[in-house]
Amino acid sequence: MLESVLIANRGEIACRIIRTAKRLGMRTIAVHSDADADALFVQMADEAHLIGPPAARESYLRIDRIIEVAKRTRAASIHPGYGFLSERAEFAQACAENGIVFVGPPASAIKAMGLKDAAKALVQQAHVPVVPGYHGSKQDPDFLRQKAYEVGYPVLIKAVAGGGGKGMRRVDKAADFDAALESAQREAQNAFGDPRVLVEKYILSPRHIEIQVFADSHGNVVHLFERDCSLQRRHQKVIEEAPAPGMTPEMRAIMGKAAVEAARAVGYVGAGTIEFIADGREGLRPDRFYFMEMNTRLQVEHPVTEAITGLDLVELQFRVASGETLPFTQDDLAIHGHAVEARLYAEDPERQFLPSTGKLWALEFPEGDGIRIDTGVEAGDDVSPYYDPMIAKVIAHGATRDEALDRLAGALGDTIVAGPKTNIAFLKKLCEAKEFRAGQFDTGFIDRNMDSLGAIQRETDAEAVRLGVLKLIEHEFEERNYKAAIYEGPVPSPWGEHDAFQLAGPRRQGFSLNIDGERADATLEWSRPVSGDSEIDVAVRFGDGVSHLLDDYLPLDPRRFVLTDDGVIVLSHGRQTRVSPHDPFDVDLEHADGGGTIKAPMHGKLIAVFVKPGDKVEKGQRLAVVEAMKMEHPLVAPSDGEVAEIAAEPGAQVAEGARLIVLKTDA
Ligand code: ADP
Ligand code: ADP
Ligand code: MG
């Protein structure tokens, strides 16, 4: 076996490669950017080396720096993972030139499959069916429009250098062709530095079915069956499974053979994937599938194949790279059960799936039969804006498709992520969608069902807000000495002893909130216990309802509430609601002249002042209470300081904006 491996990648795939490498007794070498200095994969590796700033083109895409580290650390091999440099022939070439084993195919195979037009021409010679269309070199618009007409609409314009679903346009009629061509070319130029496109028939009711192939350097090539990756959004995979629903043994054998032929045609070595598009209108038919492209690397979704074959694909990659013969023939391989993978992303389905970065305040995955989690982050990490915002892959294996999907849905339901918004609830709904369950789906399924999958903007979850406020109050009770808690601090309570500030019966207070960044007001009601001091109930009114500390909040699963630096994130019905106390003095302080002026937030009566000139106060300490419209509004110190002046008498009527207390602040 190879003595060591440098992993030219990051995140979950770097962790996954390190795990197998360690099991095989290899020394593991991580390279990382500044942004990943504390990342899980860096901690897991035997050694780690900084290769540059966060931007990928200055770190993970720097062939020269990575090769330099590999030479310095005497790495026997480099594993490129997926993405980044994994499909760059120059990288494989640079490894070869420096006597480092590239854990992947030869540079020549990467090059041959690198451009979609050349790849189609090549596999066609090997009698592999390709999508009908034009994949020649002519690029003039009149010619391409004529070709589109001959192919017949709808057509798909595709960047020859494409990847990640970029540079692709579906065109339904001739009148739209020129504009679509122009925008596809522009996007291709921007993304790949190559504006060239091909035109192919748009396959109706398309199913994305790909075949995993494996080849050794002794001429043996096998396939490890298929994966169905038809659940896509913007031509990007969301959920993948193996085997493909509706696949027959005959069709599998035919597709498998075609994939093996395609791999042979380029002298392939290692793990590769041949992607096919199948016309699914009448179920899967052997005469209706077509080669799309070959990915000359390990795929993101390789775990589903591992689950159904019992193989470790990364181990096989290492074995084949070190010159070993494949330890099995095609006839030795069989499918066991069914596996599904969901890509858990930090993105917001309620806002067009916008990436959602930031700190992971909580991250917990379930364990269970048939559940595998591949992740590269842990609680406390940041989801950084520099890279793909994938948090984890959740993989479920079962005896049947239903069992696998049930397990996946269950695992998603038991996963806790707080901080960045995620697609967890969306994924769970997908697993449960009736048509998908019945095997009736194609690549348009997600787009057609956005609303029922919950990918629409929804109103603030008022119940979550109320429960969040109660959590903040409970937290305040716990944090401080109980008696102090009830008259000080940013979370207000109207009872205290030293200010003679006591009333019987319920009392009401206003409470200003930040809800997911928006200002809002809630009302608190405090019920004085008849005896003892342990049973104070607080009720929060917000929206149309009211929630009680004792009856509604305390019985809940505490894992639904995740404290942050400034508030709480409430997890409910698959959504996150972020609630923090709003500090009305944040703004005032900025234009205060070296001090803090505490002003009346509204017309009302100053009913209590708890401090006197010369008192030292701490940020958050309760200084006074204004009553307006039968509600109490506590005023708190905006920062540490000393009371310079009390500008109004308790009992006085005060106007909105009136100066009440002036602080000399330390800042
Ligand atoms: P990329 O390199 O971006 O992965 P692919 O050629 O693999 O590009 O296509 C990505 C996705 O676009 C496919 O999975 C499929 O959903 C869709 N697609 C590609 N070609 C066709 C086609 N001819 N007809 C219908 N859909 C297609
Ligand atoms: P139900 O569907 O029964 O009302 P929820 O969906 O509110 O239940 O919560 C089910 C479980 O999922 C709870 O244990 C909760 O901790 C967790 N959960 C709820 N929402 C989220 C979320 N946004 N992120 C992570 N976990 C969540
Ligand atoms: Mg593809």
Image (cartoon, grey):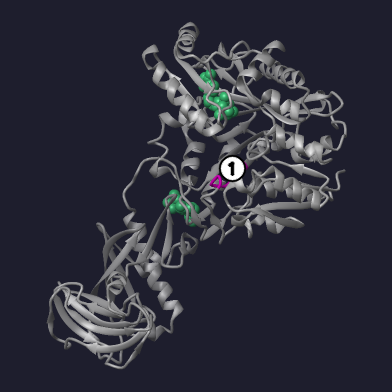
| Quarter of the figure with the C terminus | bottom left
Q: Which residues are magenta?
A: 387-395
As rendered, which of 533 and 206 lies closer to the eye? 206
266 shown above or below 560 = above
How many numbered circles does the render carry?
A: 1
Side (left or right) of 4 relative to 87: right
In percent of width and height, residue 160 lies at 57, 23
453 shown above or below 119 = below
Residue where numbered disc 1 is placed: 407
The residue lying at 58 percent from left, 15 percent from top is 137
Q: In what element is the residue under mark 1?
A: helix
The residue lying at 77 percent from left, 20 percent from top is 264
In percent of width and height, residue 229 lies at 58, 30
Main structural element of the magenta stretch: helix, strand or loop?
Answer: strand
Q: For the residue marked with disc 1, what is the amino acid?
A: Arg
Side (left or right) of 653 relative to 571: left
The residue lying at 19 percent from left, 76 percent from top is 600
In percent of width and height, residue 72 lies at 80, 52
In percent of width and height, residue 68 lies at 75, 48
| Quarter of the figure with the N terminus | top right
The residue lying at 19 percent from left, 86 percent from top is 647
As rendered, which of 661 and 286 lies closer to the eye? 661
Q: How dense is the environment of label 1, judged by Cα within 10 Å: few (below 14), some, or many (20 and up)?
A: many
